[in-house]
Image (spheres, coloured by chain):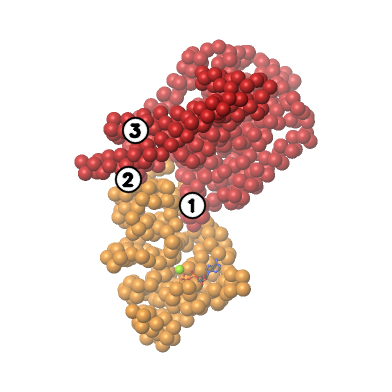
Chain colours: A red, B orange
Amino acid sequence: MTDNAINTPAQPRPLAAGLLWTGAALLLLVALPQVFPGRAAVSTLNYLGTMALFALSYNVLLGRTGLLSLGHATFFGLGGFIASHAVLAMADAGWSFPLPLIPAIGGAGAFALGIFGGWLASGRGGMPFAMITLGLAELVFAAAALFPSIYGSEEGIGIDRMDLGASFGLDYASAADIYAIVAVWLALCAAGLWFLAKTPLGLLMTAVRDNAERVEFLGFSARRIRMSAYAVAAGVAGVAGSLAALNFEIMTVHELGAGTSTLVLLMTYIGGTRHFLGPVLGAVVIGLMKLWLSDISPAWMMYFGLLFVFVVMAAPGGLAGILASGIGLARSGTLGAQAHLLGAIAAAGAIAFAGIVVLVELGYRAGLDAALGPDITVLGLGLNTQSAGSWALGTVLLLVGAAALRPLNARLADLRHSLAKTGETA
Amino acid sequence: MTAALDIRGLKKAFGPVEIIRGVDLEVRKGERHALIGPNGAGKSTLFHLISGRLAPTSGQILFEGRDIAGHAPAEICRAGLSRSFQITNIFPEMTVLENLRCAVLWKLGHRYSILRPVSGLADVAEDCARLLDQLRLSHRRDARADSLTYPEQRALELGLAVASGARTLLLDEPMAGMSHSETAQALRLIMEVTEGRTLLMVEHDMGVIFEMADRISVLVYGQVIATGTPEEIRRDPAVKEAYLGSTEEAA
Ligand SMILES: Nc1ncnc2c1ncn2[C@@H]1O[C@H](COP(=O)(O)OP(=O)(O)O)[C@@H](O)[C@H]1O
Ligand SMILES: [Mg+2]
């Protein structure tokens, strides 16, 4: 939060702004597959849309209600399994059920399970909540091994999404058909969550995040509010899991494991929990990192971790927070005065980052991937893990960049301080 | 006529230490009742017991004839008794308006509704506007609660207690830490917003107490040693001994 946001009264948030956002979002959803055609690209969009919805559901807990769930993948996975079994059973029975409505079944199932889980987990917030959600998730994961007929064994439960036949004029053979399903569910659920945030229950969720005890002294049950948030988050996660099942045509226990729970936590946090679309941003950025970076570097998990550490330490508002302060900066009219320093900071940051990349890649090649030989090209530079010069280059870049950042940041703070002062007197 | 609050033989121990040692206290309907006593006497603890934050070790708390001892805070609030806190206890990251909206939702029957946006609820808007006006916080409507000045935060704290529409209010040192002029203003505010309700208030400022209270109870070391009109309390030898005497010497 910037000081501006605190002190300036009543930023107008009229209907027009809401319509503008909605229009832009819908336009984007329609335009994306046109801009990125091709089966692989659309399949990627499906994955990103699914994860965006998953992260949005998680933020009902983390950002809205201030609850740290360590087991949100449970409902993503269970939703996906419920959807898969629904497809299998109905295909078996020869029913013609429209495929696009399958996520409603997965979502409803996850919602019902979420009510039960929420009832168990919601007595208190904070640490007890986190621990109970972790325990429940581990329980469900362990139970999966006991019921191979439900969860499949190693290879999971496979479906053929075309088994239910065509509906709505689509036969669901192509990724583009699935994109239509993903886009509509994403838009519907996002709109629903947006609306929820505006209702009395949504306001009370924020109140529980802010001061759960006080809510009780106003006549409300904080437990019931947490439980509602939990069930809603579970239901939407179930929809996302169902979409994943339709997209990949396979569900494995991996989808409801700790790795997936961690992934959605990181996506949401890195994207920014205090902006409605922050989780979407996080899901897209992390999702793309996962897909692309894993192709070009064995160390992609490392960069992922570094990004997380950077956000936690330097930008707790997440990527959305950075974006918002950028927009605030552009609107403040002082961007010109700060441009030279911001440019210098960006350059210093890029140099330090280049140093990190060089060192990380050298490290991976020297260690894990030593079998590939000592020669490696990083950022267009021909390096060698056995040459001291290569390591020195990385170290120097990192140190020079980092050393330059500190005084530059201090000067920026000074400049902003004086700009704020002149702004006040003007 | 049943009393608003009738407390009988109330005790509260933290481990081996008994802090409330058999309190008997009656607050009549519609009266402004002050609770005074030295620091650490157990005034806040007594409020916690009445409002459900703490469960008593033994004893009865009859609110309008019904025993509420050990009940949950939410239940007690819904029954018509609400409170403010000595240490400001508001929603810091929400705006003043949002704070008040939370406080009126139950009373107006919206509860956990998901049917309509809060901003579209006419009764909520009307009630909040009236409260903002009463609390002199209209100009701060959209400011985050943690950006308010101290007296403004105390006004909001009071507002949350009042907004719930309770017939009986417990106010724990609503004017603590305020300057002289701020206190006078806060007192006027409290008199105004508690009009027609029952009030039990902890306060240290003797000037304030003798001005506003119909009756006063003196809590010393976990027991009520006297209850009476300001005149009676002023003359009570036990009170003089235990409390007023010592503060007069200190002053
Ligand atoms: N949770 C607790 N555990 C142990 N002792 C407590 C607790 N709460 C209050 N006390 C003690 O009870 C006594 C009365 O506190 P309090 O009710 O806050 O006094 P007052 O409001 O009259 O100044 C103090 O001595 C305090 O240390
Ligand atoms: Mg006290």
- Between the C-alphas of marks 1 and 3, the distance is 39 Å
User: At 69% across and 31% down in the image, what residue appears?
Assistant: A254
Q: Earlier in the sequence, mark 1 or mark 3?
A: 1
How far across and how far down the image is residue A45, in percent? 54, 20
Residue type pointed to by label 2? Asn
Q: Is A47 left, or right, of B107 in this rendering?
A: right
Q: Which mark is residue A341?
A: 3
Q: Is residue A152 above or below residue B80?
A: above
Q: Chain of mark 2?
A: A
How far across and how far down the image is residue A410, in percent? 36, 41
Which quarter of the rendering shows the C terminus of chain B? bottom left
Q: Which mark is residue A194?
A: none
In the picture of the structure, the residue carrying the numbered disc 1 is A211
Q: Residues within 10 Å of mark 1 (few under 14, many from 20)?
A: some
Q: Residues within 10 Å of mark 2 (few under 14, many from 20)?
A: some
Q: For residue B39, which quarter of the picture?
A: bottom left
Please tell me whether mark 2 sits on a helix, a strand or a loop: helix
Q: Is B61 left, or right, of B249 in this rendering?
A: right
- Whether labels 2 and 1 belong to a single chain: the reply is yes
Residue type pointed to by label 3? Leu
User: At 41% across and 87% down in the image, what residue appears?
Assistant: B237
User: At 36% across and 83% down in the image, what residue appears?
Assistant: B249
Q: Earlier in the sequence, mark 2 or mark 1?
A: 2
Q: Residues within 10 Å of mark 3 (few under 14, many from 20)?
A: some
Q: Which mark is residue A7?
A: 2
Which callout, 2 or 1, points to the residue nearer the camera? Answer: 2
- Whether labels 1 and 3 belong to a single chain: the reply is yes
Q: Is residue A215 above or below residue A177?
A: below
